[in-house]
């Protein structure tokens, strides 16, 4: 009878299990991590910068939890990266078909690229500069706080909750949905639809070649609007002042002021070449109810 030492390993007769990497810390990263450090001299490496540089192949996964470091770099192929509560000066993530999942907050200057069908789904992003791109995968986040953000996809949908700051969104065949925008927003699609609720604004520029555009605003918003499309519908709850209307080659343009007339530095422009533009009234409370339903 074969002894335990001579028994074949389970994966020798089948596929070898993909490796995974798990990193977690609930104590400050610059402190020496030891079983018992009460009587141990301070580590000479305690004040040196901490960097994470992780790379997996195949379906190898990465899990990082509650880490603070200077630089965090992760590269996977088809594997999933799960990041929870990460704070770093620079967060750089690359995947070639895998998933990037963020739990809690990812804080820092963030650069994420997911190719093929790789997707990005992060609860909260916060930093000065945030750049995220996908090819054919979903790009989703609940909260986005950044001075400057650029999110793009070729064929994937972009689904955003509450966004703040200067934000640029672009997709070719996917759609763009923003539950609440506070700041400057520029969004464009080729075929996909755009659906945005503007709670506060500086400048909002929405463009599509063939998709429809829906703009939802609180009735009290002060802004100048310019809406262009094959058809333009303005809700009866919204009263535009000094309205101008023009038609050319089956293309309609309507412009006017919401509430105050001197808000030329705050404007919304929505332009679709072959689609429809809708302007609707929606309160912040209604937007919250829609998000929770």
Image (cartoon, grey):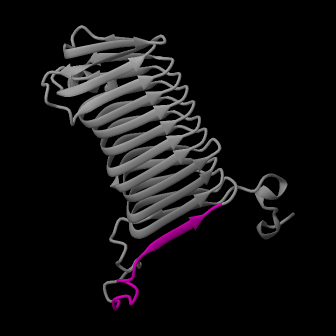
Q: Nearer the viewer, residue 192 or 260?
A: 260
Q: Which residue lies furthest to the top in this view?
A: 236
Q: Percent position (x, y) of residue 25? A: 40, 66
Circle count: 0
Residue 196: x percent and y percent? 36, 28
Residue 154: x and y in percent read 58, 38
Question: Residue visible at 19% across and 13% down?
Answer: 239
> Which portion, as a residue range, is magenta?
40-56
Residue depicted at 77% across the width and 66% down the height = 4
The x, y position of residue 293, in whole percent, is 34, 22
Question: Principal SS element in the magenta part?
Answer: loop
Residue 72 to residue 133: above or below: below
Placement of 162 over or under 124, stated as above or below: above
Q: Which residue is drawn at 65% across and 54% down?
A: 77
Magenta stretch: residue 89 in it?
A: no
The relative height of residue 94 versus residue 216 in the rendered view (above or below) is below
42 drawn magenta = yes
In the rendered image, the residue lying farthest to the right is 1
Q: Which image quarter: residue 68?
A: bottom left
Instruction: Name the residue located 60 percent from the left edge and 42 percent from the top edge.
Output: 135
Which quadrant of the figure has residue 54?
A: bottom right
Front residue of 177/88: it is 177
150 over 6 or under it: above or below: above
Please give left or right for residue 81 compared with residue 87 in the image. right
């Amino acid at each position: 009878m074969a002894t335990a030492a001579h028994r074949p390993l389970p994966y020798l007769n089948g596929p070898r299990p993909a490796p995974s990497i798990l990193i977690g810390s609930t104590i400050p990263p610059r402190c020496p991590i030891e079983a018992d450090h009460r009587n141990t001299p301070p580590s000479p490496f305690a004040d040196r910068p901490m960097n994470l540089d992780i790379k997996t192949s195949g379906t190898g996964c990465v899990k990082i939890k509650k880490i603070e470091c200077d630089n965090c770099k992760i590269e996977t192929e088809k594997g999933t990266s799960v990041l929870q509560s990460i704070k770093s000066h620079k967060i750089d993530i690359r995947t070639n078909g895998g998933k990037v999942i963020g739990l809690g907050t990812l804080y820092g200057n963030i650069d994420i690229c997911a190719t093929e069908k790789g997707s990005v789904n992060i609860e909260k992003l916060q930093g000065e500069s945030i750049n995220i791109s996908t090819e054919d995968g979903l790009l989703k986040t609940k909260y986005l706080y950044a001075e400057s953000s650029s999110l793009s996809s070729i064929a994937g949908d972009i689904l955003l909750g509450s966004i703040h700051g200067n934000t640029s969104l672009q997709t070719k065949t996917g759609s763009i949905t923003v539950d609440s925008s506070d700041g400057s927003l520029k969004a464009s699609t080729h075929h996909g639809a755009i659906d945005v609720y503007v709670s506060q604004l500086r400048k909002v520029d929405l463009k599509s070649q063939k998709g429809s555009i829906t703009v939802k605003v609180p009735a009290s918003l002060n802004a100048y609007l310019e809406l262009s499309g094959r058809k333009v519908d303005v809700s009866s709850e919204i009263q535009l002042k000094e309205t101008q209307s023009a038609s050319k080659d089956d293309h309609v343009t309507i412009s006017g002021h919401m509430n105050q007339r001197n808000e030329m530095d705050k404007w919304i422009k929505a332009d679709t070449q072959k689609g429809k533009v809708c302007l609707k009234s929606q309160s912040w409370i209604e937007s919250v109810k829609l998000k929770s339903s």
